[in-house]
Amino acid sequence: MVVVALTFSLILTIVLGIYYVFVVVPEGRELKALRQRIGGKGSISAVPTARLERPTERLSNVDLVNSVLQQASGVSGPVERLVTQSGLKITVGSLLLASAFLGLTTYLLVKIFTYMTLLAVAVAPLGAAIPFLVVNYYRKKRFETFEEQFPESIELIARAMRAGHAFPTGLQMVAEEVPDPVGTEFKLVYDRQNFGMPMSDALKAMAERVPVLDAKFFVTAVLTQRETGGNLSEVLDNLASVMRERFKVKRQVRVITAHGRMTGWILAALPPALFVVLSFISPAHTKTLFTDPLGVKIMAVAGCMQIIGTLVIRKLVNIPY
């Protein structure tokens, strides 16, 4: 156990040291320089000239890692989209670094405890996937919040148009009065069309950033009305009513499947909980599972079956609506 603790502490120290040297220190220098400029320190000639072009989004605070990720757009593109949709203030490089660190840590721990290289290699991707699962969780929660706020936002645009305002003004009102994430997305649409992008392209970009069915309905309805004409405020009112009904059906489905989801969580948590209880009641029996080669194989097979069973139960209780 001492060797395991020392190895883990050494790896953690190395990773945190690299992160501090290449990420924290450069950010601190930039923040210090910014505070000096805001505070009026330094000469006027030191103030940088204004740029009309929007700076390229950095994928990492480390210049070398940023250049590599920008060149490997096939790998960094989906990860950047995932981070953007989650709304988290992290970079692609930070996410990949956390994934690599957890994958390496999982590999070393399994290797040290079981002495099985193949098992360690098989389990390491599970540890590496934890940061992506966390980001995907926040992405899912953000989209759920978007679905809850979206009908009210559409009704706000419809009321603004009935009061005599133009459609872009309605977008601006939503951007100013509705909180994130709907307000942020509509603000981006309004800013883009205000700076010259066609309204159709700005709306299509929003539908790509927010892959929610309600957003696609909204974009399709607005683009169709712009081509064929009609009363857009009435169309938006009807669309908001349909979205509220869909949201009501979704809530009803979750209520109906609550028993199945609860049963699935209990079945998934029962074997690990039982193992923890047995380790306190009869530690000699559970110790055999780690010291005997056959016990290690049984633990590996049981862990794989536990993961497969959890995924199957999750698939059964996840009813589309």
Image (cartoon, grey):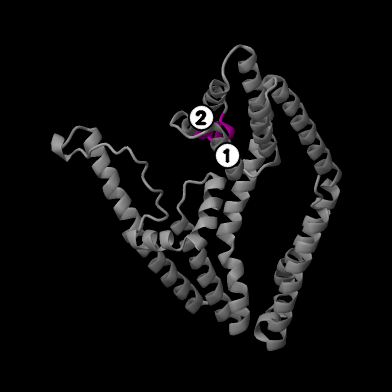
Label 1 belongs to which residue? 206
Amino acid type, residue under disc 2 in the picture: Tyr
Amino acid type, residue under disc 1 in the picture: Met
Q: Main secondary structure of the magenta part?
A: helix
Q: What x and y, as percent, mark residue 122?
A: 62, 76
Crowd rating for badge 1 (residues with CA inside 10 Å; few <14, some 14–19, many 20+): some
Left or right: residue 221 compared with residue 36: right
Look at the image and tell me whether residue 317 can be seen. yes
* Closer to the camera in the image, 284 or 163: 163
Left or right: residue 268 compared with residue 112: right
Left or right: residue 254 compared with residue 44: right
Crowd rating for badge 2 (residues with CA inside 10 Å; few <14, some 14–19, many 20+): many
Q: Earlier in the sequence, mark 1 or mark 2?
A: 2
Task: Identify the image quadrant of residue 227.
Answer: top right
Left or right: residue 167 compared with residue 10: right
- Identify the magenta region: 179-190
| SS label for mark 1 | helix
Q: Are marks 1 and 2 in contact (CB under 8 Å)?
A: no
Residue 187 colored in magenta in the image: yes
Q: What x and y, as percent, mark residue 113?
A: 59, 79
C-alpha distance separating marks 1 and 2: 11 Å
Which residue corresponds to the image point at 46% horizontal and 75% vertical from the top-left?
7
Which residue corresponds to the image point at 36% horizontal and 45% vertical from the top-left?
55
* Closer to the camera in the image, 23 or 170: 170
Compared to residue 173, the image places residue 162 above or below, namely above
Compared to residue 41, the image places residue 295 above or below, namely below
Q: What x and y, as percent, mark residue 316?
A: 83, 57
Label of residue 190 in the image: 2
* Closer to the camera in the image, 199 or 321: 199
Most distant residue in the front direction: 228
Compared to residue 299, the image places residue 161 above or below, namely above
